[in-house]
């Protein structure tokens, strides 16, 4: 067997990891403001205030809006997910087995990506509900009222992320499941089912904050949360003779931050009601 087979294996494995990460590893990265190729330990997202239009006289100077710029810093951290593969395993010759290991690493990094984004969401200060009821239509409309009051754009980039119990409650609403309201299609978001209702893309997620029987769900605009990536998912495979095994290391450098608190609402739900 050619000694270059390891190089081919590494490239194929890394391609599988990256593909699995993009398709099924993270659910939330595409729902927020994301910046890739960051160089350094941190990056800055710009939060721009509102401008005011006014008139001018003929031949006069165009008035300046004097927009308020508030830079929001996002710190990147390094994350790793590795595993050992014995030399006698069929990983190098069985593509299905390779994908199993690749997917496991991608899922682990994907969960970390979503954990970072949810952590940034948890810094939101706008709340509706008090954990005494489940996710009701009244709660949803109250959250929408907050966003609309804040002039958050209804431009198709509003998202909601809810837990399993809350998703089941949504499925009991005719407006959420009936084709008369949401159409005949159920769009996929990173390999998972989602639904479009009230101008919001609804996403099911298992990693939302849960304390006893109290669950935090979030309705937000994509521009309210920032995600930064210094290094996309990368794989490294090294041989360890004393173990007669390869060590497969997956790594990434990412971070997330709350940019604009006006664009996100925490919905406090009971996880049992």
Image (tube, helix red, strand yellow):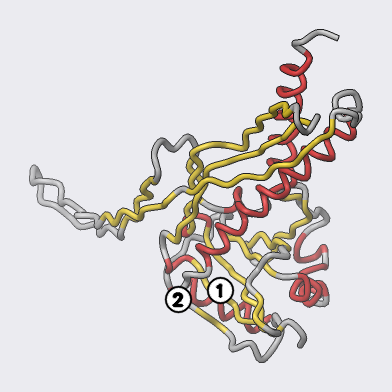
Mark number for residue 182?
Answer: none
Farthest-out residue, front: 242
Residue at label 1? 144
Measured as percent of width and height from the top left, residue 206 is found at 73, 65
Indicate which disc, 2 or 1, sits on the residue closer to the N terminus. 2
Tell me if mark 1 has few (under 14), some (14-19) or many (20+) residues whose alpha carbon lies within 10 angstroms of its own: some
Work out which quarter of the rendered image holds the C terminus and state it: bottom right
Give the x, y percent position of residue 171: 81, 72
- Pair 2/1: label in front: 2
Q: Residues within 10 Å of mark 2 (few under 14, many from 20)?
A: few
Which residue is located at x 15 percent, y 51 percent?
A: 63
Q: Quadrant of residue 210?
A: bottom right
Q: Residue at x 45, y 57 (%)?
A: 257
Say which residue label 2 marks: 125
Label 2: element kind: loop
In this picture, residue 141 sits left or right of residue 93: left
Q: Quadrant of the N terminus?
A: top right
């Amino acid at each position: 067997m050619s000694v270059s087979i390891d190089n081919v294996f590494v490239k194929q494995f890394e391609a599988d990891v990256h593909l699995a990460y993009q398709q099924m590893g993270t659910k939330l990265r595409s729902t927020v403001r994301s910046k890739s190729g960051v160089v350094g330990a941190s990056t800055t997202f710009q939060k721009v205030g509102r401008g005011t239009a006014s008139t001018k006289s003929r031949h006069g100077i165009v008035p300046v809006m004097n927009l308020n710029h508030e830079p929001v810093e996002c710190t990147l951290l390094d994350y790793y997910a590795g595993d050992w593969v014995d030399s006698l395993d069929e990983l190098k010759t069985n593509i299905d087995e390779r994908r199993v290991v690749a997917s496991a690493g991608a899922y682990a990094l994907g969960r970390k990506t979503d954990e970072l984004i949810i952590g940034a969401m948890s810094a939101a200060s706008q709340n509706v509900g008090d954990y005494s009821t489940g996710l009701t239509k009244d709660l949803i409309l109250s959250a929408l009222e907050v966003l609309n009051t804040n002039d958050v754009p209804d431009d198709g980039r509003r998202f909601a992320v809810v837990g399993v119990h809350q998703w089941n409650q949504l499925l009991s609403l005719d407006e959420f499941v009936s084709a008369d309201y949401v159409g005949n299609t159920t769009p996929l978001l990173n390999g998972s089912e989602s639904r479009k209702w009230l101008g919001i893309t609804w996403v099911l997620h298992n990693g939302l904050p849960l304390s006893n029987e109290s669950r935090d769900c979030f309705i937000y605009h994509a521009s309210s949360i920032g995600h930064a990536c210094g290094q996309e998912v990368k794989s490294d495979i090294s041989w360890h003779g004393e173990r007669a095994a390869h060590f497969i290391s997956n790594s990434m450098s990412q971070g997330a931050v709350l940019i604009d608190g006006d664009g996100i609402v925490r919905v406090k739900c009971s996880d049992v009601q």
